[in-house]
Image (cartoon, helix red, strand yellow):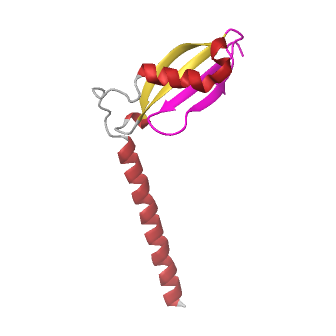
Amino acid sequence: MRAIIAYHRRATAITVVAVLALFVAGVYAFNLPHDARIPPNPTLPQAYQKAVQALGSQAGTFYCLRASAMGISESYGPTEWHLVFYSTNGQLREVVVPTTGKIIVRDKEQIGD
């Protein structure tokens, strides 16, 4: 019985240490300083073109309010563009254009709500 309890304690301790190690590694990886001298990829004109394509037929009813390039948690990770579009009916729509992967289009709260 003691051997089983000791085994479970050891397994629990190893699991806790592994989870903590992964957490610390993740925090470290996302807190590396971002080198602003490295230009974002894609460029702003490329990201804007992809965002307008993602808006599809509604692209004519929106105009771009702002665009910002963000590194994932300001680290050396890939950069993604966040473009916020506004429609005359007060609708805000954000388009996220990552370095790689799928473009994300999401509605935000309307202005005045």
Q: Image quarter for residue 77?
A: top left
Q: Is residue 3 left or right of residue 61?
A: left
Task: Measuring from the top left, give residue 109's x and y in whole percent.
Answer: 68, 22
Task: Measuring from the top left, give residue 113's x and y in whole percent.
Answer: 72, 16
In this rendered view, identify the residue nearer to me: 56 or 101. 56
| Above or below, comparing residue 84 to residue 31 in the picture | above
Q: Over which residues does the magenta segment extend?
A: 88-113
Task: Measuring from the top left, give residue 97's x and y in whole percent.
Answer: 50, 30
Q: Is 59 covered by the magenta stretch? A: no
What residue is shown at x 43% (from left), y 71% (from top)?
14
Task: Measuring from the top left, give residue 107's x and y in whole percent.
Answer: 66, 26
Q: Is residue 8 left or right of residue 60?
A: left
| Above or below, comparing residue 110 to residue 41 in the picture | above
What residue is shown at x 67% (from left), y 18% (from top)?
58
Outermost residue, bottom side:
1
Q: Is 100 covered by the magenta stretch? A: yes
| Above or below, comparing residue 72 to residue 28 in the picture | above
What residue is shown at x 62% (from left), y 14% (from top)?
86
